[in-house]
Image (spheres, rainbow, N blue to C red):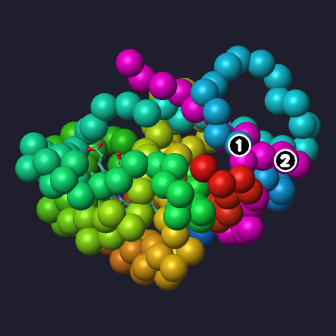
């Protein structure tokens, strides 16, 4: 069963926002803190904040071997040492969505090696992918990563490698939000 999460930015929250940087396209409004919670319909409490929605869904591209490799290496969210995080909302271009599924997979992995590159950074980086496109959201994906402070430079290297791939030619909006946990797990 798919679960939809709200990423709500405002004055208070479980994560303090340390920076918001527009990497491509429009950024997001400044905010102090972020809370991630199961989505419930309703108004945004704080009119100065933003709220993004995304659903944890089935895999689209990973093969059986890749899934097995990921499961063998990856760790879950909410690890005690993972006090730092990144929320990176991403929107891909119409040209990407016009491609056939097998052409997208070929760009994603055979050309860009997204999974192969990402695997090198497991288990230090824990992640959760949320799909937003079918919710009519401004972004197609909300990508969420948790890591220990000492692993943030490695995360930055991972980001640089992915952004240099052919897949990223199809990214038309991307914002990099960095966060620090306000309460221990
Ligand atoms: C930490 C290491 C990472 C691993 C192991 C990893 C692995 C994966 C895998 C296996 C998928 C495909 C899921 C599917 O089959 O549907 C995926 C999708 C995706 N990942 Fe990563 N990833 C990593 C890091 C990143 C980073 C740093 C970003 C963003 C800056 C990112 C952005 C995305 C996006 C946007 C998708 C969805 C692509 C699409 O459906 O078009 N990933 N990732």
Height in image: 83 above or below 127?
below
Q: Residues within 10 Å of mark 1 (few under 14, many from 20)?
A: some
Height in image: 35 above or below 127?
above
Q: Secondary structure at mark 1?
A: strand
Horizontal side, residue 88 vs residue 20: left or right: left
Q: Secondary structure at mark 2?
A: loop
For the record, the magenta segment spans 1-22
Q: Are marks 2 and 1 in contact (CB under 8 Å)?
A: yes
Q: State the residue at coordinates (78%, 53%).
A: 33
Kindly identify which residue carries mark 2: 12
State yes or no: residue 135 in magenta.
Answer: no
Kindly identify which residue carries mark 1: 35
Gap between marks 2 and 1 measured at Cα: 8 Å
Q: State the residue at coordinates (51%, 49%).
A: 78
Q: Nearer the viewer, residue 121 or 100?
A: 121
Q: Main secondary structure of the magenta part?
A: strand
Q: State the residue at coordinates (30%, 55%).
A: 74
Q: State the residue at coordinates (91%, 37%).
A: 47
């Amino acid at each position: 069963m798919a679960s939809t999460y709200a990423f709500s930015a405002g004055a208070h929250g479980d994560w303090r926002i340390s920076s918001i940087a527009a990497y491509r396209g429009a950024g997001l409004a400044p905010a102090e803190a972020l809370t991630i919670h199961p989505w419930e319909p309703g108004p945004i409490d704080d009119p100065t904040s933003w709220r993004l929605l995304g659903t944890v869904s089935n895999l689209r591209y990973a093969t059986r071997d890749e899934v097995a490799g990921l499961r063998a290496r990856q760790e879950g969210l909410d690890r005690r040492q993972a006090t730092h995080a990144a929320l990176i909302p991403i929107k891909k271009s119409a040209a990407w969505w016009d491609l056939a599924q097998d052409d997208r997979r070929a760009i994603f992995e055979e050309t860009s090696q997204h999974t192969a590159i990402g695997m090198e950074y497991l288990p230090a980086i824990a992640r959760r992918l949320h799909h937003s496109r079918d919710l009519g959201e401004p972004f197609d994906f909300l990508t969420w990563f948790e890591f220990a402070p000492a692993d943030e430079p490695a995360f930055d290297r991972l980001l640089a490698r992915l952004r240099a791939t052919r897949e990223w030619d199809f990214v038309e909006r991307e914002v990099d939000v960095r966060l620090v946990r306000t309460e221990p797990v």
